[in-house]
Image (cartoon, coloured by chain):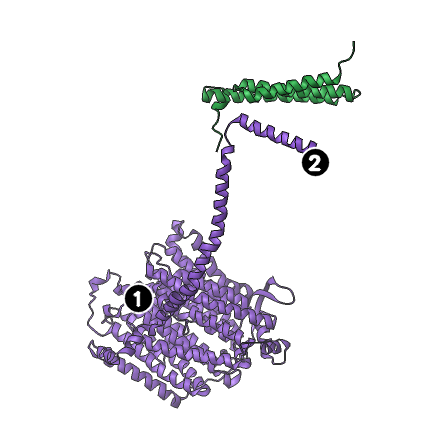
Chain colours: A purple, B green
């Protein structure tokens, strides 16, 4: 099989699953019954191809290389605007996209597998798998994009599939509201993205990633001179373009202050949260910044600083909120936001090329390891919710004996995210902290504090679920399904192995800002501070939550307003509501509605009224009397005759 | 025998036309209305033939036109009578004032 066909089949097979199950999934009984098997096996083939392609890219004759150059596998001219500007559809293989291909397909396969058990018996089982296929297709298309417009198209497609999956339980009002919120917020951010694309494309006269990067990083090129010379409100067009593109990325990646949709997105089925809202889609923003990274790093330090500070603020902000939430999925959602903040600021503090680019490698390394342990956490949470039938910590406790496999895998994922060696998160977090230390001390100390908070809230979650109190769920009380089917346990075990193992991958050898091999070094002295802080966080969590007591409440009470503010997510939702309901609706919405109702509608109503009145007046002429009509006819003829004979003559 | 002048013939056709028109406006019976229409058509026929004879004696266009009119009039009469029969079936009357439903 040719490499080109194989790469086309990677997104092609999930698309096939979507079309097959989406069109026939609910009408054909056979397809409905085997929807899960079909979706999962197509995904497995796609995953195999992706692994094969990634392996083939990173190795040549089975030997890892020291320098990776991007490779355009194919390119199809889709829309040509003349004068050299065109929108192409292509497949772009470089270290980041190969890595993403492997991660996305693997996590998607795990989620497909897990859903076989978790979603069993759902009424719209076929539709669920169709949507999963659509999402995987869009995400893989996004990853493979060779053109900034192509990435935008797939960007919107992942937005739609995320909307569909959050609103999967469409008869639940909260799910409907959450799906609308996610769609509107990300759509709003994507408006910025589109304007950014257009302004970058306008000045650089291309939409192609490689040409765009080449032109905008060459400080002598006419395009670069034009875009830096043009300015708006005192900021150059290049900065505006990059910032607006970053707004799109921040919306998708739930960066402060566009994060409000992510916690609500947890209304979707839990495996979906694992796939979309933890491991793959939400890192699209990081991926986008990484794609355009040379431009950020070489041409525009201001935009890069914005990325760094947005990242660190989101990381800290989300970590504080995560300490106060009681819905286990929301805790995980905020922890996702916090970890993506890590990835963002790692990009933000990084430079380009060689040792300076360590932050870039660290960021994508964290993206890579985070995908595994975070999807493991979510799938574990799925198992727990499946068992307990509740999302609230209050309803859990003491589950460690009832769910041994979930317990072990969840514990390992918690250790990984807390950054305890030798689990995966330790290595990537070390690399990020290293980069931050070299880049900006302020960011480094905040990041250090955040990593302690991370350890604390993750173990708060862990102890509340698995320890805290004696199990109230007897073995008779779990509807006989225990921990779930083998298809639910297998992904947990595989991801557990991954969460332990992937940290040992010498990631920066393969993925670096300039494609050259970068030696990563673990500095034991440097690791003392973050690891001991993480251990401190864990010990503190154990002290508060290992056995149920009133210490947490006392602390919450002593913190008073601060605790309440964090529990209410710092009132960001309320601020948004205030802005939209009070300001936008009153100042823009209502006047616009008034104009529409009274002026636009009024014009059409008036013409209708005039027509009606007029026809009422003349309708009496149509009497139904044939001889009457003949009289009008005669009158008309005579009138015409007079006109012709006497008047016009 | 002196030939009849065109004026006489035109007078005849005009009176025939207005008799027909009078009948069309005053009568209520649909059959009579149809007959009045036939009268008007025939007055036109007379005009055609007369003008043909007096203005263009070497041609026959007017005569042929008359034949067309007669043919069409026959077809029209057939259709009209069919309509009248149907009207009678539904209204039990052929009075034109009883068939006044086709109004606003």
Residue A636 coordinates in the image, percent (x, y):
61, 31
Residue A331 vertical position relative to residue A297 in the rendered view, above or below: above
Residue at 40% x, 83% y is A430
In the rendered image, the quadrant that contains the N terminus of chain A is bottom right
Say which chain tag 2 marks.
A
Picture residue at 55% right of the left edge, 17% below the top: B32
**Residue A216's image quarter?**
bottom right
Residues under numbered marks 2 and 1 in contact, where contact means CB atoms less than 8 Å apart: no
Residue A568 placement (x, y as % from top left): 31, 72
Could you tell me which secondary element the residue under label 2 belongs to? loop
Q: Disc 2 versus disc 1: distance between alpha carbons? A: 96 Å
Q: With A16 as the anchor, is A331 left or right in this view?
A: left
In this view, which residue lies farthest toward the top? B1
The residue closer to the viewer here, A410 or B78, is: B78
Q: Secondary structure at mark 1?
A: helix
From this view, report whether residue A217 is shown above or below residue A383: below
Q: Earlier in the sequence, mark 2 or mark 1?
A: 1
Left or right of residue B79: residue A276: left
| Residue at the disc numbered 2 | A648
Which residue is under mark 1? A383
Chain letter behind tag 1: A
In the rendered image, is residue B34 in sight? yes
- Residue that extends furthest to the bottom in the rendered view of this protein: A525
């Amino acid at each position: 099989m040719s490499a080109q066909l194989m790469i086309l089949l990677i997104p092609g097979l999930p698309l096939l699953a979507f079309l097959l199950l989406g069109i026939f999934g609910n009408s054909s009984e056979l397809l409905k019954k085997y929807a899960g098997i079909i979706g999962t096996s197509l995904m497995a083939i796609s995953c195999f191809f992706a692994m094969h392609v990634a392996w083939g890219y990173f190795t040549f004759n089975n030997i890892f290389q020291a320098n990776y150059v991007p490779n355009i596998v194919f390119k199809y001219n889709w829309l040509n605007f003349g004068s050299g500007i065109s929108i192409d559809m292509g497949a772009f293989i470089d270290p980041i996209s190969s890595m993403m291909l492997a991660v996305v397909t693997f996590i998607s396969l795990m989620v497909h597998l897990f859903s076989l058990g978790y979603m069993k018996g759902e009424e719209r089982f076929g539709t669920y798998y169709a949507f999963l296929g659509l999402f995987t297709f869009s995400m893989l298309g996004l990853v493979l994009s060779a053109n900034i417009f192509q990435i935008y198209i797939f960007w919107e497609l992942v937005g739609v599939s995320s909307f569909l999956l959050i609103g999967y339980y469409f008869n639940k009002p909260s799910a409907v509201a959450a799906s609308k919120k996610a769609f509107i917020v990300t759509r709003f951010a994507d408006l910025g993205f589109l304007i950014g694309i257009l302004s970058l494309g306008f000045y650089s006269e291309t939409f192609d990633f490689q040409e765009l990067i080449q032109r905008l990083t060459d400080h002598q090129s006419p395009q670069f001179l034009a875009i830096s010379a043009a300015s708006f409100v005192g900021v150059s067009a290049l900065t505006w373009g990059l910032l607006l593109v970053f707004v799109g990325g921040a919306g998708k990646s739930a960066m402060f202050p566009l994060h409000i949709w992510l916690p609500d997105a947890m209304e979707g089925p839990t495996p979906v949260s694992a796939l979309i809202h933890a491991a793959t889609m939400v890192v699209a923003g990081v991926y986008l910044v990484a794609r355009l990274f040379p431009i950020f790093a070489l041409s525009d330090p201001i935009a890069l600083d914005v990325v760094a500070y947005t990242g660190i603020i989101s990381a800290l902000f989300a970590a504080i909120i995560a300490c106060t939430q009681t819905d286990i999925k929301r805790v995980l959602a905020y922890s996702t936001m916090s970890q993506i903040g890590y990835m963002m600021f790692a990009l933000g503090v990084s430079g380009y090329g060689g040792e300076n680019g360590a932050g870039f490698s660290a960021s994508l390394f964290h993206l890579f390891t985070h995908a595994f342990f975070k999807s493991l956490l979510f799938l574990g949470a799925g198992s727990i919710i499946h068992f307990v039938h509740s999302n609230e910590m209050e309803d859990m406790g003491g589950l460690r004996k009832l769910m041994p496999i979930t317990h072990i895998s969840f514990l390992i994922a918690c250790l990984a995210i807390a950054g305890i060696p030798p689990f995966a998160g330790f290595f990537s977090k070390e690399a990020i902290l290293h980069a931050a230390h070299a880049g900006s001390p302020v960011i480094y100390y905040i990041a250090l504090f955040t990593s302690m908070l991370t350890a604390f809230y993750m173990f708060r979650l862990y102890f509340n679920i698995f320890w805290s109190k004696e199990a109230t769920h007897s073995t008779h009380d779990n509807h006989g399904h225990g921990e779930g089917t083998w298809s639910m346990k297998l992904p947990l075990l595989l991801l557990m192995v991954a969460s332990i193992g992937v940290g040992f991958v010498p990631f920066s050898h393969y993925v670096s800002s300039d494609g050259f091999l970068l030696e990563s070094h673990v500095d034991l002295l440097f690791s003392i501070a973050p690891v001991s802080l993480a251990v401190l966080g864990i010990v503190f969590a154990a002290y508060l939550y290992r056995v149920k007591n009133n210490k947490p409440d006392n602390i919450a009470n002593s913190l008073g307003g601060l605790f309440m503010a964090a529990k209410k997510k710092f009132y960001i939702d309320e601020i948004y509501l205030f802005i939209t309901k009070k300001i936008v609706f009153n100042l823009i919405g209502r006047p616009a509605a008034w104009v529409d109702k009274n002026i636009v509608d009024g014009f059409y109503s008036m013409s209708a009224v005039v027509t009606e009145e007029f026809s009422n007046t003349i309708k009496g002429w149509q009497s139904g009397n044939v001889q009457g009509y003949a009289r009008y006819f005669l009158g008309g003829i005579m009138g015409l005759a007079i006109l012709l004979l006497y008047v016009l003559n | 025998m002196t030939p009849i002048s065109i004026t006489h013939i035109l007078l005849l056709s005009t009176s025939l036309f207005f008799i027909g028109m009078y009948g069309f406006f005053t009568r209520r019976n649909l059959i009579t209305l149809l007959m009045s229409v036939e009268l008007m058509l025939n007055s036109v026929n007379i005009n055609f033939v007369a003008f043909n004879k007096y203005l263009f004696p070497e041609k026959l266009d007017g005569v042929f036109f008359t034949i067309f009119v007669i043919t069409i009039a026959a077809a029209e009469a057939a259709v009209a009578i069919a309509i009248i029969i149907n009207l009678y079936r539904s209204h039990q009357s052929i009075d034109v004032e009883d068939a006044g439903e086709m109004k606003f």
